Amino acid sequence: IFQLAEAQAQGHRRIRTFQALLSAYWGFPVNGQHTSQASLEGWSALRDWLSSEYRHLASRKEFKPPWFASLSKHSNLLTDRPCEKYGADLLRGDATSLNDARDCLAIPQDSWVFEEAFFAQIRAASTLRDDPFKEKLDTLLPLATGKGGMPASDALKIRCIAHLVSRYAQSADPVEHPALRDCATSIIGNPWLHRLNWDSWVRADEKPDEQAREMVLRWLRDPLVVGFFELLSADGMNERRRLAYWLRFALFVDDMWFALGSSTRTRNNTQFVEFAERAKGRLLHLEGASPDNNAFVMRIGEYLAVEFGESGNAFYLYR
């Protein structure tokens, strides 16, 4: 196709061919669920050809239609960072330049350009210092999840949330952010249960972002440790000593489970329902014990530590 386009002797025919391929470039489903890697490579080859052909046509003396002149202002759209130019403006609420590109170049509303422009806005936010970034976060999260009036594909949601959670983990004080935690676990997945999936998306320097993963794991685990001793142990709120003890080791816990007695499993109060939802996938039945007893089971390296909830503070350590 490229050779056929370049073989056009008449300038206006070559420009029309260029315009047709440019239209195909705008309309390609870059983030489509069924878009193959091979077709993405073909789209990248088309982008490179369009960039080269644009420079060739611009150097010729023939008359150029107005849209061609507009492309000179938005030649960034033919690079491997096509929408980086618009990110900072969009973050300030200024879509003038992006709208100009859309109108002058006849970019369809469902083009990948607008998803990439939104992701550029996320990237621009990540370059801010900690405090301004955190101020923007509450505004960006609804947009990134498709709840702010802008539709977002599943792929875009994952990319945006992965980028935001990775940037948040780099901040000096990454205290638990409930909205970011919920977005991350619902859209990307729970890193505790689906680590491979999480690591494939949340990356830093082209490697799994361990700092971000451990941050979210801490957000998930610490409340569970607190919940066990406040909700499920026999002494309830009086078990501050044991709670403080095990919270010191939460960072080193590779996995944890909660084995519940029959009495506990029938609870339906709000606190327990919230605990059970957070501990989904890690709840077990405790058999051979009193109905009110529960057990907190932790895997730490090669050991299993089992702390029972009933008074007496029964504790067992198994290799």
Image (cartoon, helix red, strand yellow):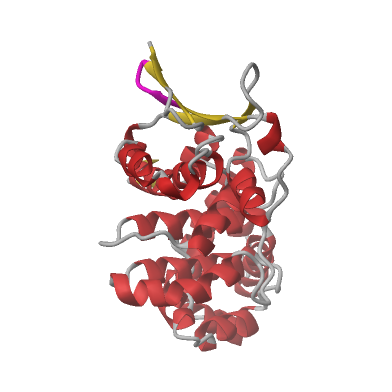
Q: Can residue 46 be seen here?
A: no
Above-or-below relation of 276 to 131: above
Q: Exactly how many numbered labels are in the figure?
A: 0
Q: 27 or 213: nearer the eye?
A: 213
In the displayed structure, does residue 264 sit left or right of residue 310?
right
Q: Is residue 173 visible?
A: yes
Q: Position of residue 94 (x, y in %)?
A: 49, 88
Give whichever of 6, 10 is nearer the camera: 6
Residue 36, x across and y down, in percent: 65, 40
Residue 64 occupies which quadrant of the picture?
bottom right
| View extreme (left): residue | 172
Please state the horizontal and vertical placement of residue 297, each as a whole percent of the image: 48, 26
Report whether 70 appears left or right of 26. Answer: left
106 in the magenta segment: no
Depth check: give the residue in front, 167 or 256: 256
The furthest residue to the top: 319
Q: Nearer the viewer, residue 175 or 292?
A: 292
Dominant secondary structure, magenta? strand
In the image, which residues are magenta? 298-302
Q: Residue at x 68, y 51 (%)?
A: 32
What residue is rendered at 63% in x and 61% in y? 25
Quadrant that contains the C terminus: top left
Q: Tell me residue 273's x, y (percent).
A: 67, 49
Left or right: residue 70 compared with residue 32: left
265 over 312 or under it: above or below? below
